[in-house]
Image (cartoon, rainbow, N blue to C red):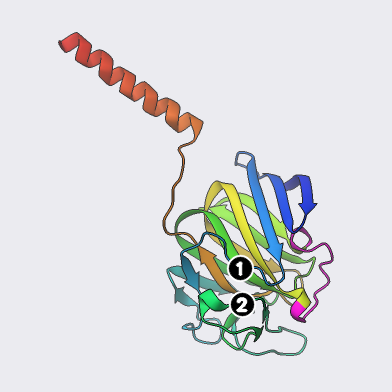
Amino acid sequence: MTALASRILATGLLALSVTAAGAAHATVTINASIGGAPVGADAYATFDGLSLGNAGGTSTGIVVSFTGDAQTVNGGLSGQYAAPFLSGGNGGLFGQPDGVDTTNYLSTGVGSVNMLLPALEHYVGLLWGSVDSYNTLQLYNGNTLVATITGNDVAASANGNQGANGTFYVNINSSDAFNRVVATSGSYAFEFDDVAYKTQRTDVPEPATMALLGGGLLGLGLIRRRRA
């Protein structure tokens, strides 16, 4: 249903032209690096306030819910989930030191983690642990799919490395707005933490919106001239 075209990978920067059913062409830019950090964000969700298990809840405005055996976890469980790593000081914005993540984080298991954002966004970032080819992240505007990103789009060798070199901070920018992020995995495991987004948005109106606005202003001008 979703095709990824014009794929460019250089120095950790990946630009994708995404075609989603029911949506216009979305350009998605991914900047993923070991030890990377959020870029331009001003809201940071750690999920530390969520109860362990599948109850979900709200963290820094993000409403989290689960399907299947996805859940909030801590530490590691052999064969099911392993904690991401922080490096290069990228946990500073989230109040975490470098090293294995000792705080709560989210695991998809073989279910899904659904994150409803407070408003429409063009950016989201996350600490993506043990990146694997069968990990999938989907961006939605309501129920309309905007983009699909897999582990292969994040790391050239997405092999599930559970060490420090297998965790990437992934910054995602989309030309099309989204307000829901869904993480799934075809097998154990997909773990992530430290999600970032922007609350101060400087959206530029799309051309069609600008045309409508211009037409409205022109109409108002004509009405005023007739009344003069």
Query: Which sits earlier in the primary sequence, circle 1 or circle 2?
Result: 1
Residue 156 falls in image quadrant: bottom right
Principal secondary structure, stretch drawn in magenta: loop
Q: Depth check: 46 or 186 in front?
A: 46
Query: Magenta segment range?
Result: 152-164
Tell us which disc is closer to us: 1 or 2. 2
Residue type highlighted by circle 2: Gly
Residue 178 at what x, y percent from top left?
A: 53, 52
**Crowd tier of the residue under label 2, counting other residues whose Cα lies within 10 Å: few below 14, some 14–19, many 20 or above:** some
* 219 w.r.t. 37: above or below: above
Q: Secondary structure at mark 2?
A: loop
Note whether residue 130 is visible. Answer: yes
Residue 110 at what x, y percent from top left?
A: 70, 74
Q: Which mark is residue 89?
A: 2
In contact (CB < 8 Å): disc 1 and disc 2 = yes
| Residue lying at 50% horizontally and 73% vertically, measured from the top left | 45
Magenta residue check for 183:
no
| Residue lying at 23% horizontally and 15% vertically, measured from the top left | 223
| Residue lying at 76% horizontally and 90% vertically, measured from the top left | 78
**Crowd tier of the residue under label 1, counting other residues whose Cα lies within 10 Å: few below 14, some 14–19, many 20 or above:** many
| Residue lying at 78% horizontally and 69% vertically, measured from the top left | 132
Name, please, the residue furthest toward the front: 88
Q: Secondary structure at mark 1?
A: loop
Residue 92 falls in image quadrant: bottom right
Please indicate whether residue 221 sits to the left or right of residue 109 in the image: left
Please indicate whether residue 218 sits to the left or right of residue 198 in the image: left
Q: Which mark is residue 37?
A: 1
Residue 135 at what x, y percent from top left?
A: 73, 67
Residue type highlighted by circle 1: Ala
Spatial separation of the CA atoms under disc 1 and disc 2:
8 Å
* 202 w.r.t. 77: above or below: above
Please indicate whether residue 158 sits to the left or right of residue 25 in the image: right
